[in-house]
Image (cartoon, rainbow, N blue to C red):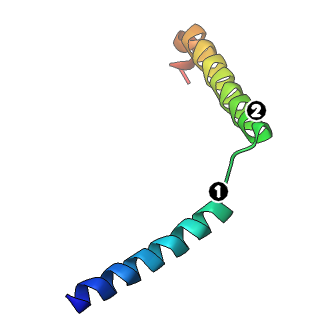
Amino acid sequence: MKTFVRLNVALRSHWEKVQAHASEDRGDISITTIIIWVAAVAGALAIAGTIGIVVSKYNAKLSGI
């Protein structure tokens, strides 16, 4: 029984330390970061789409290269 109580106290103490650390370091993402990511993804999709359109338009001419 003593071992169970000691283990319970140790686990509770460790859990409280983990919770205290987690509340300090939340790692929230700012709006600026989200805007940059959305712009980067939109730019990548626009470039990929443009390349796809150009390749499909000139596919016959490119096959002779």
Q: Which residue is mark 1?
A: 26
Residue 51, numbered label: none
Q: CA distance from mark 2 to mark 1?
A: 20 Å
26 shown above or below 63: below
Give whichever of discs 2 and 1 has the lower sequence position: 1
- Most extreme residue toward the right is 32
Query: Which residue shows up at 80% across the image and 38% down it?
Result: 32
Q: Residues within 10 Å of mark 2 (few under 14, many from 20)?
A: few
* Residue 18 image offset from top left, x and y in percent: 52, 71
Q: Which residue is mark 2?
A: 35
Q: Looking at the image, is mark 2 or mark 1 nearer the viewer?
A: 1
- Residue 2 location, quadrant: bottom left
Depth check: give the residue in front, 54 or 18: 18
Depth check: give the residue in front, 36 or 5: 5
16 shown above or below 50: below
Q: Amino acid at mark 1?
A: Arg
Query: Which residue shows up at 68% across the image and 25% down it?
Result: 42
- Residue 53 location, quadrant: top right
Asked if residue 5 lies left or right of residue 45, the reply is left
65 shown above or below 10: above
Query: Which residue shows up at 59% across the image and 8% down it?
Result: 57
Q: Amino acid at mark 2?
A: Ile
Which quadrant is home to the N terminus? Answer: bottom left
Element marked by disc 1: loop
* Residue 23 image offset from top left, x and y in percent: 63, 61
Query: Which residue shows up at 24% across the image and 84% down it?
Result: 4
